Image (cartoon, grey):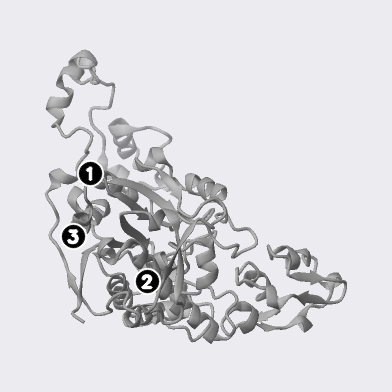
Amino acid sequence: MAASDVYFMNARSESPQTGLVAKMLTVFEAAGIDQLIKPGDLVAIKIHCGEWNNTAYLRPVYPRALADRIKELGGRPFVCDTTTLTYQPYASRATELDLKMTAERNGFSSAVLGCPFICADGFIGTGDYRVDVPTGYLLKEAYIAQAIAAADVLICLSHFKGHPMGVIGGAIKNLGIGCQSKRGKHNVHLGGHPKYSVANAAIWHPENFKGKANMEDWKILEDCCPYGLFKVDDTSIAWDRPKCTSCLGCIGVMAPRGLFEFPEENFAATDAAIADGALGAVLAVGKEKCGFINMAIDISPRCDCVGFADMPIVPNLGVFASKDPVAIDMACLDKVRESHGMPGSIVDDFDLLEPGTRKFETVSATVHGLSEETQINTGTLNGLGNRDYNLIEPEPQAMKRHVFALDQRPSGERFSAKFLKFTPFPYERHDGQGFLREQEIDTEYIKSWHSSDDNGGVTGATGAAEGAKSGD
């Protein structure tokens, strides 16, 4: 298979056309994603709106700029995310209501985006479209959020970062988890699987429960499961394993208390399933109608699904675009490996600051032994894409394309008549100087001043001169 083209611009900005928004639009066009859109097309912009109190998610200005460009092309954009599994006791996006309220708190609303923000899989996450995945490495079917499957064009706008289960989170994860309905997420997380599900893979240690009297917060052991599968009495805990759906709501509760232990194989199988789910999303829309943009900025060690954000593990790297989700993730991963680690971040804790280290496998993976390439390799094997890529760096576009779009007249034309009516500078005051100010100050003095040099509160040139006379 021929190498796929990935378009890349670095994160440095020194002019309007080299800002990150401008670079995102530049690689969007360089990769030919704009050519996928025909007048009247419904265009889904799939983003992650960020968990409650997460701060690493992509700013709303990025999907807004894409939506504006799509409208110029004649398309009808909508920005979307999907409901989550109840993967933690206090999940903030598990229903449409929760998702929309969290998204709005994080800045994603129709007023900000210039187009609707919708929950793509319905109120509880069961609005979906089933698609066969005959070449899937593990999954043979996928359940794709209905609004995404119904779109004419899909643009995955992904924040590239780490992930505790997937190890990396980029285009493949945005497809393989983010585009799945709640039913689809149960499928990808292998609920009911005879070997790799939580029910059948977790090593259960009920002996580590020492009784209610020795655990003040014992009630959360029951309340973490939306299916009510854990029961606690004064001295023991019971788990109705056969009914477990792998919703993951219990993992962050049971594992830290020594009640759950997971083999690496279970998580590795889930990573493979993510790539199969990604293929299902692409098949549902059509491979020729999907484009991918990865923003490799604020590269946190964990995903945007957690209610916090640790400091980035490497500096901002830049913006990537491609029609191949496997190639774009591989290119991002290579750039992270090539980069120096961020001093003071978690990679510093593990002595991974030097280029060439596989940072995510150590600082992001929940289970030791997971590979940051499993999604990528599976996506190559199942036909989703190609890990081999050509990295192409386009030139910045003309500055005029990226200045204030709502009124592109020069300032003289825009304001001369208005400033005659409403003069913001008072020429008539102080002999045309406009404002009352000192005529001159000692700039050298204020550059090197310290509190020990205090001259009693005198200011400006007069104060400096008086200070000099007094010997200060």
Mark 1 vs 3, N-terminal side:
3
Say few, some or many: other residues with alpha carbon within 10 Å of mark 2 (under 14 / 14 to 19 / 20 or more).
Answer: many
Q: Nearer the viewer, mark 3 or mark 2?
A: 2
Q: Quadrant of residue 7?
A: bottom left
**Amino acid type assigned to the residue bearing label 2 in the image:** Leu
Q: Looking at the image, which residue is at 16% across and 34% down?
A: 408
**Amino acid type assigned to the residue bearing label 1 in the image:** Gly
For mark 3, what is the residue?
32
Nearest the camera: 132 or 396?
Answer: 132
Mark 3 vs 2, N-terminal side:
3
In the rendered view, tell whether residue 83 sits above or below residue 176: above
Tell me the quadrant of the picture where the N terminus can be found: bottom left
- Spatial distance from mark 1 to mark 3, Cα to Cα? 16 Å
Nearest the camera: 274 or 368?
Answer: 274
For mark 2, what is the residue?
279
Nearest the camera: 39 or 73?
Answer: 39
**Amino acid type assigned to the residue bearing label 3 in the image:** Gly
Dot 3 falls on a residue whose secondary structure is loop
Q: Say whether residue 313 is visible.
A: no
Using residue 229 as the reference point, say whether residue 394 is left or right of it.
left
Say few, some or many: other residues with alpha carbon within 10 Å of mark 3 (under 14 / 14 to 19 / 20 or more).
Answer: some
In the rendered view, tell whether residue 353 sits above or below residue 449: below
x, y percent for residue 412 = 12, 27
